[in-house]
Amino acid sequence: MDKSWSAIRERARQDLSEASYKLWFAELTAGDLSGGVLELIAPSAYVKRWLSGHYMDLITGSVRDALGPGVRVRLRSRPAEPVESRQVDPSVATAHQTTLDQALSAPPFPDRYTFETFVPGPSNKFAHAAALAVAEAPPSRAYNPVFVYGGVGLGKTHLLFAVANHMWQLAPRTRVRYVTSESFMTEFIKSVRERRGYQFQRQYRDVDVLLLDDVQFLARAEETQTEFFHTFNHLHQHERQIVIASDRPPQELGGIEERLRSRFRSGLVVDVQPPDLETRIAILQLKALRDNLAVPDDVLHFIASKFDNNIRELEGALLRVAAFASLSRQATDLPLAERALEDLIPERGREIPPALILDQTAEYFGLGPGDLTSKSRSRPLTTARHVGMYLLRELTGLSLIKIGEHFDRDHTTVLHGIKKIEGLMPARGSTYKQVQELTKKIRARGRGGA
Ligand code: ADP
Ligand code: MG
């Protein structure tokens, strides 16, 4: 059996690119062969779904070549391991626990932000290739730092997490540190106040890879910039990898010292652009597959044609269509999608100010100023808060931390609120209606309408 199994895998290796082979086949193992059925075991339910959606013909073909024409294949997934058993370098694990970004960086989102879930296309291919190169061969001295820039919702944070996840998979002991520049600043200031400067430095210098997100928020924070400058130099001199994400290119980072900007320019600078139609469709297809949503291609095509410059909004639109179908117990077809997205289509180049969302949310729920940030946990207030959080996330590019600041809550509360709405929309008509009506109002106001 071992020999046949090698032959089967060899065939996949020949037919696929190295990257795809590694992603999907490297950890596939053979189980029992009995009664003419060969059992194959995928490392996770996600890989199993992907294999059955994309590679069943290839798998069945090579199994039959090796074992005989009548053999059938059954795919199974290994039960998930408990999160604690994951091997992360203890120093990194504790370092992560102290950061605000923990919820997004490590095991809680195992297969959400990875290279497998990132769809490459002409708009992001350089950023994707650079991130993959970093993840596969650190420290890549030629590209250090890698500086990724581009607009809101175009996959920069996704790529940073993908680097971290990929490296943990390849080498679980790699010390990877992800931080937003806002958290870096907050922690730095706290460490100075509490005279723990040394510990702070060790947290950021004793790492193999530093991923710094949203660097633009370092603007005008002079002391933090100086600290980061030294951190950067230390890592660079020791050939540790640095990856930075930004909403604009280094030369346009106003309020950031020239010596830092020139460091940012010294490696590889790559951008992410809004994705083209084909890429948007592919992103929706993958999202539908991952979330088990049965949405026909013409509907995906329709959504992709309407939402063209922010992938978060694109994905939000898909969720709304699916929620509407589920609530109204109708098939997900074009007329239904058109109704679900009526008046929601964003206008290009027009940003929605967070204050507008907050004001409209309060008004819609009949609340006064201050209610959204109050400590009251009464049911109507909580619902209004969760809806507000959901809309801020979908309609603006704000980080969870920033959204939290608007409600005087921390980022885990925000994440919880968003998940709550995502879960309620397909199940409860009133929630769906609230989100839809409010979005329409906000968009109409954003356009300067009534
Ligand atoms: P940014 O950091 O650039 O504002 P994010 O990385 O937060 O954007 O991406 C926004 C959303 O879009 C996330 O849910 C992310 O998974 C998704 N996304 C972005 N680019 C892609 C892509 N190429 N393939 C799949 N999903 C993507
Ligand atoms: Mg981001």
Image (spheres, rainbow, N blue to C red):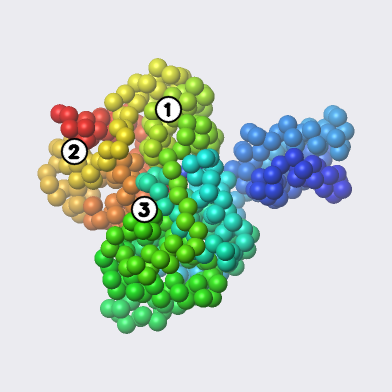
Q: Residue at x 36, y 52 (%)?
A: 247
Q: Residue at x 61, y 38 (%)?
A: 49
Residue named by callout 3: 248
> For residue 410, which quarter of the picture?
bottom left
Which label lies toward us, 3 or 1? 3
Q: Secondary structure at mark 1?
A: helix
Residue named by callout 1: 305
Task: Give the residue at the far top of this rendering.
Answer: 335
- Sequence order check: which comes first, mark 3 or mark 1? 3
Residue 132 visible in this rendered orientation of the protein: yes
Within-10-Å neighbours for mark 1: few <14, some 14–19, many 20+: some
**Where's residue 377, x and y in %?**
23, 49
**Where's residue 320, x and y in %?**
38, 31
Q: Is residue 46 left or right of residue 272?
A: right
Q: Is residue 269 left or right of residue 218?
A: right
Q: Residue at x 59, y 43 (%)?
A: 46
> For residue 405, which quarter of the picture?
bottom left
